[in-house]
Image (cartoon, rainbow, N blue to C red):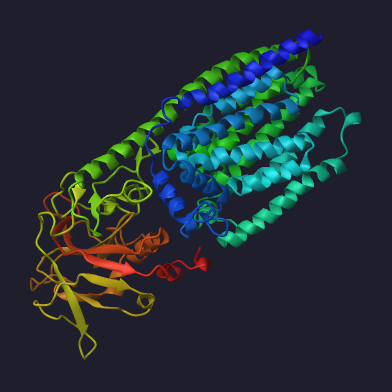
Amino acid sequence: MQEGESSQRRWFVLGVILVAVLAIVPSIGTLDAGLISDDGAALGYVHREGPLADFTGPQYDLRTFRFWRPLVTASLGVQEAMTGVAPVPLRLFNLFGHVAAALLLIAIARRLGVNRVGSLVVGALAATFPYQGGTVTWIVGRVDTQTVPWILACLLALLSGRRWWAAAACALAMASKETAVVTPFLGLVLVWAQTMQQEEAERTPWSARLALLAPSFATFAVVFVLRRLAIGDWIGGYPGGLSNVLASGSLWDVTWSCIMAALGSLSGLAAGLVVVTLLVYGQGLTKGWSGGTRQAAVLLGASVLCLALALGPVVTNLTLGEVAGEHQRTLYLADCLGALGIGALFVAGGGAGRRLAALGIGAGLGLIAQRSHEAWVDTHDWAIAGRQADALVAGVHASLASAEPSTRPVLSSSPPVAWNGCYVLKWGVPDRFRAPFPESPRPVWPWRPLFEGGEQLRSSVTVPKSHLRWPFGEAPRTVPLLRVTEGSSSPDGGQAPTGAGGVLIEELHLGAELLTEPGPLLHCEGYFPGARFEALLFTEQGYGVGLFGGPKRGGAMEAPSAGEAAPPFGGAISLRELLQLTPLGTGTGGPPLFEVVALAADLGATEGYLELRATDDARGKTNRAVGASQWIHLTWDPELRDVLKPWDSF
């Protein structure tokens, strides 16, 4: 008997090793791929600010959106200090967290009455999470592979009766990502399930169970308050996220959209849970709710409830009825907890239980194979995105190899934001050309709209060279010059130009007084019949567009009868009025250019470049530039962010 038990343990250990291998295999060939989008921005931030930067404020010191993830910043900062920006050790950290989550789930399944074979199936399902490209290959995706193991460690500690270990793990999880806010509630559900699986006479008193849960809930309350003090908001995330969800339709419509999005993204696992539900509850209805059948039903119900709880913090990703490819990684915790439900097939005892277990093994192997393929494709898609990003960076470095050093930026020709649902270069463009990465002789900014929208796409007015857009004076101009000089106020309160001989404006400084005062007047000299007046503001993260003169009317605006250009051509516009222009071609939506400055300032920028344009829709082209000004260098003090994005404006 002892020899048989020892043999089973050896086979179980081999099974655990196999689960770890399943977790590793999808990442083979991807660990050395290039850094992806935000990876560069995050590594640049921790290089400048250090690993402890985010304990008393929002992640990356941002107010545009507010997350509190100090331990993720800390782990990234420590690694950057030790191994630099080499991708392999950074990804190995993520991979370790992924393996740890699968192994912890095996232990949780055992604590909830799943037999050894069934617990290995559960662990294998977690190991083959289909979207692990976003949690392992994408380095900043460690927010999930660092958080989920701590959540599962807390749940395992609670099921093992170790309340203080559970409280510590809960604190570490909540300091890693906001989704961990559900941790003590998941513990309550699973502790209830463990209790209900026991025979009534042997059940642990609820007073003891509540005492077991109390430290975790106390930790939750303390850390939740600390988070509120750090980010200045109880909810955080993206501004208006939860309120926008509730305002997007009736509660039923929102719920239905979320259900459909979850079913679509969890696909194979969701189908497996449906089959398990039919089998377990079918057996209960036909054979009775005793012994293993009751235990299986309790585990299945608890697993589905935990899955629903885990989806709560990511509800804003679900409301559109499908989850965008780059956000599917946020379902990691829900996926792990849903896998526990498959383990219900391995709880029911007796002959029927053995038949259910046999079905579970067959179905589980098929599901594991499908998920392994999806995980392989996902990790390698993200690796391709990383290699594309590296190729773009290398190309720019080659183009700038002989360039004279300058603080004036060049614009990289539209590096793609994403490829096949995987980020390529979104927020990380300027950081890839400064420390801790190899520095370029000139700053490199992306040529693309800062805010999404097809009507904001604009073409360059200088001839591109080597995939780069160069400022005026460094590349041939394709349109006439729209002269911008400084205007003045006339005695009667009107705006009087300085005259055609005025000196071109090259520098402007933005201060807080622009919120209430008009600021300098920009006199725009040019003759562009029927053209619209636009402003482009280039920043480190992309450009914004502002339109003067009202909405587009399906074509070029008509020029006045005298043949003169519509204001402000041949007139003046104040800097404050210009920065209040809205960016969309319809003139009816989107934030003003002030918001472009605010976002750039929030991301650490202290400068931008302003280009004024005359545009029309002639010759079959929309928003065709027919004139453009010199680049006007805008600077602002870092403190301007406090005015444009005060803490109470979130």
Q: Is residue 148 left or right of residue 326?
A: right
- Which quadrant of the structure image shows residue 507? bottom left
Give me the residue at 31% from left, 68% from top. Answer: 635
Give me the residue at 41% from left, 46% from top. Answer: 38
Q: In this rendering, does residue 649 appear at all?
A: yes
Q: Where is residue 508 in the image (x, y as percent from the top left)?
A: 26, 72
Of residues 517 and 427, the one nearer the viewer is: 427
Q: In this rendering, does residue 357 appear at all?
A: no
Q: Quick check: 79 above or below 554? A: above
Q: Quick check: 321 above or below 474? A: above
Give me the residue at 39% from left, 37% from top. Answer: 422
**Residue extending farthest bottom:** 491
Q: State the count of labels.
A: 0
Q: Where is residue 249 in the image (x, y as percent from the top left)?
A: 52, 50
**Residue extending farthest front:** 82
Q: Quick check: 43 above or below 102? A: below
**Residue extending farthest right:** 201
| The N terminus: image quadrant | top right
Q: In this view, does 85 lie to the left or right of 194?
A: left
Q: Position of residue 58 (x, y in %)?
A: 53, 57
Q: Quick check: 524 above or below 186? A: below
Q: Position of residue 251 (x, y in %)?
A: 58, 48
Q: In this view, does 105 lie to the left or right of 631?
A: right
